Amino acid sequence: MEKHKAVPQGYMTVGEVAKKMHVTVRTLQHYDREGLLPPAAISEGGRRLYTDRDLIKLHQILSLKHLGFSLDDIKNRLIPMDTPREMAAVLAQQAAAVQRKIDSLSESLRELEALRTEVLQMQSVDFKKYADIIVNLQMKNDYYWLIKHFDDQTLDHIRSRFDRDSGKAFLDTFIRLQEEAIRLQHEKVPADSVQAQKFAEAYWKMITAFTGGDMSMLSRLMALGRFEDADSEWREKQALAHGYIEQVLGEYFSRLGVNPFEESEA
């Protein structure tokens, strides 16, 4: 490292750099100790001296730090800036990091706005439901709004039966089978047909996975499509699905010689 008696042309003191880049001298000294931004030269009096190139590197460090990277992460992300291609790569890296931050913040904003809407629609403060809604929003579950309709017993049952992944898988299965029921009805597939009874078997398998043998949960699951304050499209689709599902399950249980719905009401 070069040593100079005075500050030569093209060099800046640590104080000048701090002022230009709106950081403290202590910050620059820390970056030097961490090996992130050593000075380009040292004066004979021991003053750190920097160049315009160091300002660019400092800007890169500050940008990455602002995006939440640790100093160790930043060390691994700093790349040479000796050619236009390398300089362009630095800028591209920073632009990509900024875009990821924007995407993350946009997603956080979407979740906050959705949660705010749900909170205003609920009749009381319920932190357990808020937590469940947040988890489902983070899972990109479009049906997070169903949670506010469940009573405490149903939610406790769901929490005991499913973890994050299995709960999402169950809901995906529920929605898929509802859509299939609507399709079979539109195609006028008879309830006693092989195709309809295969569907009934799959639907009942899903129901037993939900209830876990607790038949008191059966009526709660079947009520999923009957929430009065759900949007009209949801209610119409679920009404269509349930009309057909009741027919095929009735035939299915008739063949089995049992009626779980009557047992759950007993």
Image (cartoon, rainbow, N blue to C red):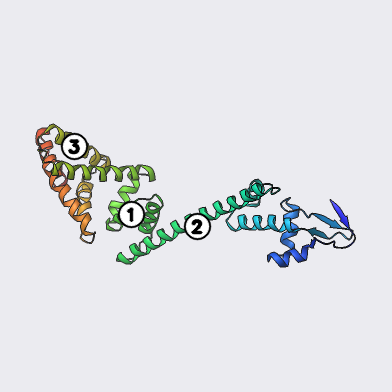
Quarter where residue 245 is shown: top left
Does residue 218 appear anywhere in the picture? yes
Q: CA distance from mark 2 to mark 3?
A: 44 Å
Residue at mark 1 = 144
**Residue 186, x across and y down, in percent:** 14, 44
Callout 3: SS? helix
Mark 1–mark 3 Cα distance, whole angstroms, equals: 26 Å
Is 114 positioned to the left or the right of 54 in the image? Answer: left
| Callout 1 secondary element | helix
Q: Amino acid at mark 3?
A: Phe
Residue type (three-letter) at the residue carrying disc 1? Tyr
Q: Nearer the viewer, residue 254 or 212?
A: 254
Q: Residues within 10 Å of mark 1 (few under 14, many from 20)?
A: some
Height in image: 256 above or below 66?
Answer: above
Residue mark closest to the camera, 1 vs 2: 2
Q: Few, some or many C-alpha atoms within 10 Å of disc 2 (few <14, some 14-19, many ≥20)? A: few
Q: Circles 1 and 2: CB distance less than 8 Å?
A: no
- Return the residue at label 3: 199
Q: Residue at x 27, y 57 (%)?
A: 149
CA gap between label 1 and label 2 equals 23 Å
- Whether residues under marks 2 and 3 lie with C-beta atoms below 8 angstroms apart, the answer is no
